[in-house]
Amino acid sequence: MSAMINQIQRFNHHLFSPLSVQCRRMLFSSQVELVEEWGSRMLQKRIETKDIITASPLNLLANTLNEKALSFTGDDLPKKGTMVPATYHHIYFPPRTREKELAKDGYETHFHPPSPPFNQRMWAGAELIFDNENPLCVHDQAKMITKINRIEQKKGGRLGDSVMVWLDKDIYNKKGWSMREQRCLIYASTNENDSVESSSVQQRSIKMNKKPDFSTMIRPTSILLFRYSALTFNSHMIHYDQDYARNIENHPNCLVQGPLSSTLLITLLRNHLYTQESKQDLILTSFQYRCLIPLYVNQPFTLCGRKLNTNGKSFELWINDYQGNLAVKGSAILA
């Protein structure tokens, strides 16, 4: 630990020397031009992916999450016409990418900013909106259209120079538009000798000063992370390769997937409504969340929720890590 602190101090001394500051300004200026050129091309790009909403993956994810309020658990498959639960869309429309076409971290590169310098990807959160008159259902033939909504560059800060990319993912069935996920990804600038995620020394500590109406604690096992990555065809190495997570991205262990965190929050809400209000179906108008700090395998965290006193249909949802720090914050509105 002392060696790491000394290394950080030497790095900071070099980073903020007058020459280094001048060099960084010139570097960022060239990065801005690089990203602007890339962005102008990417804003014209759209990717259409087709899929069939089959029953088996829904059952497998429900079993993986130990769902209590869904009917298709154990050996029971969902019937034709069963509505896809909110956030379960992640198991469809996988990236159909050959291994040789993946980035060094194992993730797909369709909308990846220039790398180098922007080598590290982080999941910042997402917003989901639904057409409840035309939900995505089992046996639907569906398509997803992905395109960039906007791009934002940031200089310095906790993550260093970075690019934020908002992706719109619109899903359609034969009747028309069904839902949209707008996700936000952050790409941080690193060089080959950097440990690309220095969050272990820069993480914010935020406490949620509200008491939940309902909560549950879970310990995310390596099996849970593996099964979720397999079901979503997510080969990002920080979720399953401990050596990569520790030695390359400087995390203490493998990370819990951002979409998995959101799905666990919706599962918490669904179970609460099922047990307290006897609601069989959780139908959402919208759901949004932000990932604030990483969650790690085998470190327990607490899923929390509370009803807001607006119209009885709005809920605040969040996750506290094992130290009580706010890790994920979101809200959901019922139909």
Image (cartoon, rainbow, N blue to C red):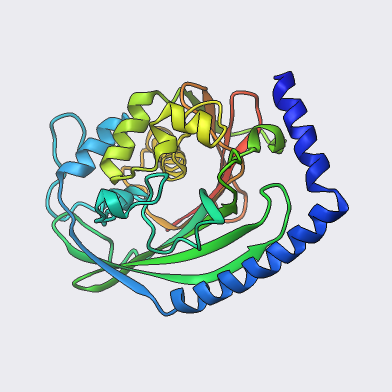
Q: Nearer the viewer, residue 69 or 185?
A: 185
Instruction: Answer left or right for 250 relative to 225.
Output: right
Nearer the observer, 180 or 40 = 40
244 with respect to 160 (left or right): left
Q: Is residue 335 above or below residue 202?
A: below
Looking at the image, the residue that sits furthest to the front is: 19
Residue 24 vs 145, above or below: the answer is above
Which residue does the image show at 46% across and 22% down from the upper left?
219
Looking at the image, how many numbered discs can be counted on the residues? 0
Residue in the picture at 32% in, 48% down:
88
Q: Position of residue 165 (x, y in %)?
A: 52, 63
Picture quadrant of residue 29: bottom right
Residue sitting at the far right: 18
Q: Judge whether residue 313 can be spotted in this image.
A: no
Q: What residue appears at the point 57 percent right and 32 percent down from the top-left corner?
A: 250
In the picture, the quarter occupied by the C terminus is bottom left
Q: Is residue 257 above or below residue 46?
A: above
Quarter holding the N terminus is top right
Q: Is residue 141 visible?
A: yes
Estimate the x, y position of residue 329 in percent, counting from the top left: 59, 45
Of residues 138 and 123, the one drawn nearer to the viewer in this rendering: 123
Q: Position of residue 102 (x, y in %)?
A: 34, 52
Name the spot of residue 33 as percent of width and height, x first: 62, 74
Q: Quadrant of residue 153?
A: bottom right
Q: Is 92 situated above or below 5?
A: below
